[in-house]
Image (cartoon, rainbow, N blue to C red):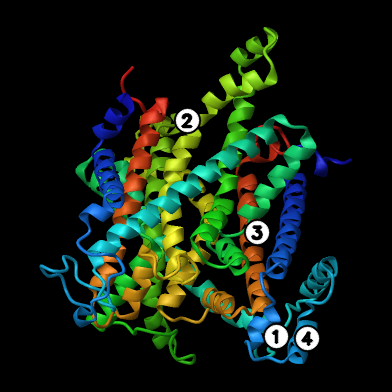
Amino acid sequence: MGLLRRIWASPSGRLGMVATLLVILGGVAAPLIATHMPNQLDVAARLTPPSGAHWLGTDHLGRDLFSRALFGTRIAVGVALAVTATALVAGILLGVTAATAPPVIERTILAAFDIVSSFPSLILALALVAVLGPGLLNIIILVTVVFVPQFGRVARAQTLAVKERPFVEAERALGASGGRILAFHILPNIVGPIVVLASMNIPVVITLEAGLSFLGVGIRPPLASWGTMLFDGFTYLEQSVWPVLVAGGSLTLATLGFTLFGEALRDALDPKLRREP
Amino acid sequence: MNHFWKEGSLARYGAFRLATAVLVLVGSMTLLCCLTLIVPGDPATILLGPRATPEAAALLREQMGLNLPLYERVALFFANALRGDLGVDVINGRPVAAMVFAALPNTILLAVSAIGLAVLIGIPIGCYAAVRQGSLLDQGLAVVSVGLVATPSYVVAITLLYCFSVRLGWFPVLGAGDPGNFVDQLHHLVLPTIALAVGWIGYIARLVRSSLLEVLNEPYIRTARAYGQPERRIVMKYALKLACIPTVAILGVGIGELMGGALFVEIIFNRPGLGSLIFDAIRNRNYPIVQGGILVVVSIFVLVNLLVDFSYAWLDPRVRENLGRAGGGA
């Protein structure tokens, strides 16, 4: 609880926490809050402004924007969490392996990281989409590939730093096995920076997924994704601004919330920035 | 071994870094080849549509080199790319290299003007916030700059397009302008540049603020203050120069981000450029263009990073000396 209180202490952390909670609650409770089914058509009411029946207006097929935005939260946050968790686990595995394995394996893993990160992330995602094709699962897979090197590099650097610390040497001198040292000493000590990285990663993944969906190579249309909503809205921009406003607004609320939360978390975890003694 | 190659020399660092860059390029090219070759389904049939005759599909496969074994295709791609031949557009037979290099100047113009604008606005904001640390203005700027960073570039682009082109009609909605008309082209460049620059303004402002604060705590700044130098001169002459180094480094990493952002901006404003070229090619499964276009983007990315690392090593000898040491960090 101390950590959350420290995040709450800064104004921007508070803002981030509230926005993040709103977004997550909206996603979790989407079926309860939503006034319509996300794909329910109402052709008579196309591109209407907000009204009593449709709180945030309707899109070009007469679908309720409020409900679609809520269900879009599930896709955005779900993909972001799935990608970040997978990239985190894969990154730790590869990073710790690189730090502890013989140099040949270390060099190979690092070279692979370098190659993957030598592509601009969106371009790599587009290239992978060209191979795998669009769709929810494929998007999760390919965006994970894009983000593994970041986690891997931090995990490796942290492992290298922790490995040389006196308490690990002491444990080794006491006859602890490599596995024990890894599980009880190295992993707990490298988790902090990686969790911070993961929280900072979530808004980036949300932006990338929505971007791919906007380009029409991400989440397939029947599913409500903020990216596809934004693209549809963009197509009908001259007739109604509400679809763009709702999709862009939800997207910005989520990325801003997670960014502020991630930064507050980083500041709260970084002992150098902590004010109390 | 003469002194030129001694440990920590710029030449040694350069050679090492150059070798890594070449390796990365070779690796990326191999990956690119594999990407477009393990495609599910037959690209030839997809291109020609379901009504294509088997003969026509076979001919196209032959033309695209899809019948060769993988290693031969990779080798062929390498050999051709080194000669500047990136293959031909499968739809109308134009050379890919010419198409890519025709689109490239548009994208570079957009990226350079966006970065220029971001530096022009971001550095003064960051400076001001650092000098007035903790003031209401500093806190306000902090929130605004996070907002600018967190908002996706395509949302910014659509918002600008709606407000200033669709509603107010101050700027043209589509295209890059009349090729011969400089003023018209400039007019078409304004909104895309702002759209691409917005996130970078926030980013650079934050970066300059934090690194300037760090530099202002250095002993030599205290010394300058003790000598009675005016604060303005201390910030402008001594501190700012050092505080800008991380900004240069970030530009290297950011060039990839910038290309991605440029792709959205190009599509939203319907500007011709590398981003929209690659994107259209992916939609049409026009693989030679995807391959060639991405190869050029990656080469630019690697080249810029090489230059940035090089200038970093030139500015800071510690970077050179750390070469090849274990635990180099992230």
- Disc 3 + disc 2, Cβ < 8 Å: no
Q: Is residue A66 left or right of residue A97?
A: left
Q: CA–CA distance between discs 3 and 2? A: 31 Å
Q: Foreground mark, 3 or 4?
A: 4
Q: CA–CA distance between discs 2 and 4? A: 56 Å
Q: Amino acid at mark 2?
A: Gly
Quadrant of res A5: top left
In this view, the residue farthest toward the right is: B1
Mark 4, secondary structure of its residue: helix
Few, some or many C-alpha atoms within 10 Å of disc 2 (few <14, some 14-19, many ≥20)? Answer: some
Q: Which residue is mark 1?
A: B95
In this view, the residue farthest toward the left is: A52
Give whichever of A85, B320 is nearer the camera: A85
Q: Which residue is mark 3?
A: B302
Mark 2, secondary structure of its residue: helix
Q: Amino acid at mark 4?
A: Ala
Q: CA–CA distance between discs 1 and 2? A: 51 Å
Which chain is home to disc 3? B
Q: Foreground mark, 1 or 4?
A: 4
Quadrant of res A249: bottom left
Q: Is residue A142 left or right of residue A272?
A: right
Q: Amino acid at mark 1?
A: Pro
Q: CA–CA distance between discs 3 and 4? A: 37 Å
Give whichever of B241, B53 is nearer the camera: B53
Q: Foreground mark, 1 or 2?
A: 2
Residue B10 on image: x %, y %? 72, 46
The verdict on a common chain for dots 1 and 4 is yes
Q: Which residue is mark 4?
A: B58
Residue B240 on image: x %, y %? 43, 46
